[in-house]
Amino acid sequence: MGYYDGLFDALGLRDWCGGGAAQDGPMTMAQLLARSRGGGEGEAVATTPWWQVPFPSLDTLNASCPAIWRTRDLTAWVADGFLAIKNTLKVVLDPLTQPLSWLLDGAIWAMLAVPWWVLVAILLVAVGLLTRSATLTASVCLSLLFLAFIDHFDYAMQTLSIIFVCTTICVVLGVPIGIAMSKRDGFQRSMVPLLDMLQTLPTFVYLIPLIFLFSVTESKLYGIAIILYAIVPVIRLTDLGIRLVDKDVLEAADAFGMTPRQRLLGVEIPLALPNIMAGINQTIMMALAMVVIASLVSAPGLGVLVLRGIRNLELGVGLIAGFSIVILAVILDRVSKAAVGRISALTPG
Amino acid sequence: MSEMEKAGKVETLAAVLADGGIEGWFVPSYLIDEHPELATIDGVLANPDLVGGRFHNCPEGWGCRTKNDNFKVAYGLEEAGFEVFDHGSGETLATSLASAYEDRAPWFGYYWQPTSLLGRYEMVKVDMGPYDAERHACIAREDCADPQRTDFQTADVVTGVTTDFAEREPAIAELMSKVSFTNAQMSELLAWQEQNKASAEEVAVKFLSENPDVWSAWLNDDARVNLAPLLSQ
């Protein structure tokens, strides 16, 4: 018995609706209250003033016409539809993404298995080679030792290994996608909405299908979530960088009779490198931004401590862990920026 | 008694779940049907492969995480060949249980009831031996030096109000002091809600319309007169 009973009667749809008396779904509180007053169920409807007309939503229409679905049927269908294709998707995606689990587990295991002083030394040498800056290397050294001093070294290294693996995969997949986008306008037009969606979709929303698709105990679950979120800037900036290469330079390359392959590897990519590196820098930062959310799907690392701080209201634990993430972020940002600067300085023009 | 209770700021009205909250280590009933020995903790420890070789642990920051981390030492989970998987959130813990149950796959881990999940899926609490208050007190501490075997404590789940509220609304406080559910009732309602995708309000209506004999005992005489049309059905 709903507000729009008259409408369906007037349109002659009552038969299609299957009569007005059917009670489909659970009784509502309003109906129960009406019954407790001992009156008829239609009473409440008759007294609805005109300015309180309910919006003709699915649920309201269903009250008048049981043949119309309720919103919860709609959500049930989405769920059923997803579950129906789930097994097929799983057969395809599960083996395809399995190496990601191995990589993540392997990287985390390796980071924790190596003695701390060896690990610090390796990281410092890498920073030194990338940036050629003594002050930066010294400040990275201090930051790492500080993290170790407050017993957050293992957590930080777990987070760092997740970021390394995910960023590497983002670059390996993202740069070719970006190059393809810069070469084909049609491909770019179809990719841009997808990239926009990946960046705006709340991360929890794409965690939901992932949880159903893969076993929740697999590390690839958070790996995929991080990669989907972090891959966008490297694709965008690769595309942009190659499109921004000076037309005169390309004309010269053509005039010298370069093949498309030579032109791409010898001219376009080197000239676009500063932009690509800026994209990689952004990708690293976005991967780091995901660590707390990834911890909700069992990613180890500093995010776990932040969650613990939130859950138990352990203010100190949460703040220190958050501060450690900031330290990691500053290190990663400075080092990748310095590397970009060095590469830009090397690039002519 | 909590500090707030001692200070006279809050008071406990009733044990809203008569059986208390039950936490423990669970295995699906279909595993027990096939392998009855899994009903006890020693049976589980002797057969890690039958339950999947993995213990599904609570997320960091939950009270049960501390207990489980001590329990796993007391029962020698890792020595018995179990991989302890620390879940990131209650959602993934629940999903792992649900998807294992749907596939009739082995599962062994921590859960608690009454919950809609255990109302829907038939799980058996693994017999962890007798409950020992002193040992359990140690298990519940993070710095427990020497965890010993004991069962989980049944948790009290109570309705509490501030004393202000009890003074201002004596009739409601009196009602709430009588409201109490058994775990079976609560699990059934929660499972029904889950299956019908019903709102909390609809569950309340279902309970009120189908179980007047249960809730009529909670009312005082005035209310019983007011609600006579509902009660007489």
Image (cartoon, rainbow, N blue to C red):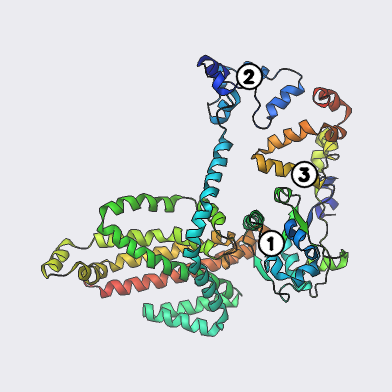
Residue at (49% x, 55% y) in the render? A89
Looking at the rendered structure, the kind of residue marked 1 is Trp
Q: In which quarter of the image is residue A157?
A: bottom right
For marks 3 and 1 on the same chain, the one whose residue lies earlier in the sequence = 1
Q: Which chain carries label 1?
A: B
Q: Do the dots labelled 2 and 3 sit on one chain?
A: no
Instruction: Report which residue position mark 3 lands on.
Output: B186
Q: Which chain carries label 3?
A: B
Residue at (38% x, 68% y) in the render? A172
Q: Is residue B107 left or right of residue B213?
A: left
Disc 2/disc 3 C-alpha distance (Å)? 33 Å
- Crowding near pointer 3: few (<14 within 10 Å), some, many (20+)? some
Looking at the rendered structure, the kind of residue marked 2 is Val
Q: Which residue lies furthest to the front in this view?
A: B34
Q: Describe the element under mark 2 as helix, strand or loop.
A: helix
Instruction: Report which residue position mark 2 lands on.
Output: A45
Nearer the camera: disc 3 or disc 1 = 1
Q: In which quarter of the image is residue A227?
A: bottom left
Viewer-proximal residue among A232 and B84: B84
Nearer the camera: disc 2 or disc 3 = 3
